[in-house]
């Protein structure tokens, strides 16, 4: 008998856990089923954990606490730590220097990264450690993995000005995660997330590396660009999962945005039902059931256990379907039988009514059928809260409420210029090519928005306008 779906394991999992569980399959998003809304307006606080994961280092607050500081506890510990390593003519000079560092390095209690290395020092509040820690690990494993060039951006302490050089030279509040060889296995982070959109994350890396050549602009634009890519990644997964076995995970689905300063109408693409945020929001309730459906299907004989651990790859509908078909008709027929049987098992485990003669006739139909029942078997409230994380992630920056039209994808002036900068890079490109580059990054504009953009670029003198033909207009590099 052909071994296909691991039904025995799935049955055991449900009987022991008494609830939905993804089993041995890797996660794909850091969302919590208990929605907290904490990420709203606080995305930048995730960046420290993200960068520390990339650089494989951790904060060592003990390095500060063990010092006998020269100033009062009213100042920031990091400023005091730096100041304590400098010689002064008198005590007043040390106080003045600490006050200066507080203003130079901090915005209230949050550090201002004046150099890429200082992103490593962005701390997470204790109450946010679990949730934001998940985001940091998700981002590093999904968007960077082991890219040495990106790691080098944040690991490098080189600076062109004396003050920054002094600050970086005196900082020793981080250490390698696996500094002690005996603790290396204990400190090593277990892989938790499965990257799914390879081309999308490749473009992110390309954009970040380009921005890193312009230090001052990078320091302000890196957080915003990273925030966008994380938000759009989640939106793309919602769209792709809804496409089941027809989804192309390597192709980005452009979604329609509106410019923050333009007016909206019902005729606009951004307010439409199929290609804007309205679609993503409507389908977000399906995200949790899709993840569990795919996780169940991923427990199969084609999915090899990761080396050194028991985790399994998360295999989206299309990837699994293509793999099954590559094994021949006999295997495909066997897998279909097993999925149909698992549907019966699942209905019994969840005590759901079992319709007669409802066996699927094809794998795409079987995947859809299983999803429908999983959605029925999952708490609507849990699925709703899980999906609403997407709105929290994009709030105040990439989403805007437009009266009766509800929320739409939104682009502010500074972010439009940032996207243009990374799309154009160092050589001017035709205007039409710019819009294609934006679509590769998930952003589409209708003809009304494009007209507004052309007018803006003309005012900013970044448009070489040879004629009224779109093909004859070129966008100049911004940086």
Image (spheres, rainbow, N blue to C red):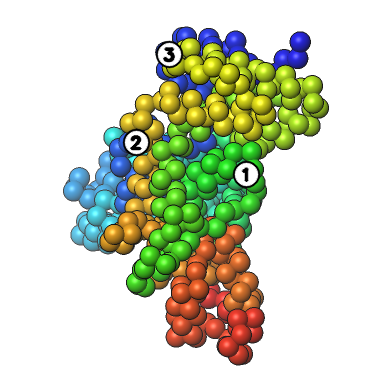
Q: Secondary structure at mark 3?
A: loop
In the displayed structure image, the side of residue 266 where residue 293 appears, left or right = right
Name the mark on residue 385: 2
- Looking at the picture, how far across and down is residue 287, in whole percent? 46, 37
> Which badge, 2 or 1, is on the more N-terminal residue?
1
* Within-10-Å neighbours for mark 2: few <14, some 14–19, many 20+: many
What secondary structure is marked by label 2? helix
Which of the 4 image quarters holds residue 431? bottom right
Crowdedness near tag 3: few (<14), some (14–19) or many (≥20) residues, C-alpha within 10 Å:
few
Q: Are marks 3 and 1 in contact (CB under 8 Å)?
A: no
Image vertical order of residue 347 relative to residue 121, above or below: above
In this view, 43 is above or below 179: below
**Residue in view at x 46 percent, y 9 percent:** 16
Q: Tags 2 and 1 in contact by the CB under 8 Å rule?
A: no
Give the residue drawn at x 74%, y 25%: 332
Q: Quadrant of residue 26?
A: top right
Q: Are marks 2 and 3 in contact (CB under 8 Å)?
A: no
**Can you say whether 53 is above or below 183 in the image?**
below
Label number found at residue 351? 3
| Any part of residue 306 in sight | no
Label 2 – label 1 distance at C-alpha: 25 Å
Q: Earlier in the sequence, mark 3 or mark 1?
A: 1
The percent coordinates of residue 434 (x first, y second) are 59, 71
Sequence-earlier tag: 2 or 3: 3
Q: Residue at x 43, y 42 (%)?
A: 284
In the rendered image, the vertical position of residue 378 relative to residue 150, given as above or below: above
Foreground: disc 3 or disc 1? 3
Work out which quarter of the rendered image holds the N terminus and state it. top right
| Residue on which the image places disc 1 | 247
């Amino acid at each position: 008998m052909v071994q296909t779906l691991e039904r025995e394991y799935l049955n055991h999992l449900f009987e022991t856990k008494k609830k939905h569980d993804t089993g041995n399959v890797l996660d794909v998003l850091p969302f919590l089923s208990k929605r907290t809304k904490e990420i709203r307006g606080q995305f930048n606080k995730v960046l420290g954990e993200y960068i520390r994961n990339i650089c494989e280092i951790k904060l060592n607050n003990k390095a500060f606490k063990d010092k006998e500081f020269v100033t009062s506890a009213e100042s920031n510990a990091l400023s005091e730590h730096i100041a304590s390593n400098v010689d002064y003519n008198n005590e007043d000079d040390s106080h003045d220097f600490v006050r200066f560092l507080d203003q130079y390095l901090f915005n209230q209690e949050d550090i201002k990264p004046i150099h890429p290395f200082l992103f490593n020092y962005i701390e997470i509040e204790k109450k946010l450690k679990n949730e934001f820690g998940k985001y940091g690990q998700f981002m590093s494993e999904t968007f960077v993995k082991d890219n040495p060039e990106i790691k080098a951006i944040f690991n490098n302490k080189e600076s062109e000005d004396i003050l920054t050089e002094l600050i970086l030279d005196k900082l020793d509040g981080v250490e390698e995660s696996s500094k002690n060889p005996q603790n290396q296995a204990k400190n090593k982070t277990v892989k938790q997330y499965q990257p799914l959109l390879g081309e999308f994350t490749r473009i992110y890396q390309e954009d970040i590396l380009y921005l890193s050549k312009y230090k001052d602009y990078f320091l302000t634009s890196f957080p915003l660009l990273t925030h966008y890519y994380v938000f759009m990644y989640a939106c793309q997964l919602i769209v792709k999962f809804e496409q089941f076995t027809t989804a192309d995970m390597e192709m980005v689905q452009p979604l329609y945005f509106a410019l923050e300063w333009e007016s909206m109408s019902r005729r606009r693409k951004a307010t439409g039902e199929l290609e804007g945020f309205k679609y993503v929001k409507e389908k977000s309730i399906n995200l949790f059931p899709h993840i569990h459906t795919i996780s169940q299907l991923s427990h199969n004989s084609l999915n090899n256990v990761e080396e050194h651990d028991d985790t399994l790859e998360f295999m989206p509908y299309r990837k699994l379907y293509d793999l099954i078909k590559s094994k021949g008709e006999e295997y495909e027929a066997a897998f279909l039988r097993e999925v149909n049987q698992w549907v019966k098992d699942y209905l019994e485990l969840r005590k759901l009514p079992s319709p007669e003669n409802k066996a699927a006739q094809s794998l795409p139909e079987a995947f859809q059928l299983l999803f429908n029942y999983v959605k029925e078997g999952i708490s609507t409230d849990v699925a709703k809260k899980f999906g609403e994380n997407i709105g929290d992630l994009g709030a105040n920056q990439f989403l805007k409420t437009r009266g009766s039209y509800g929320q739409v994808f939104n682009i502010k002036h500074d972010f439009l210029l940032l996207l243009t900068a990374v799309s154009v890079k160092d050589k001017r490109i035709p205007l039409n090519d710019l819009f294609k580059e934006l679509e590769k990054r998930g952003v589409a504009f209708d003809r009304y928005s494009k007209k507004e953009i052309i007018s803006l670029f003309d005012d900013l003198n970044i448009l070489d306008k040879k004629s009224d033909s779109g093909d004859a207009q070129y966008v100049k590099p911004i940086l």
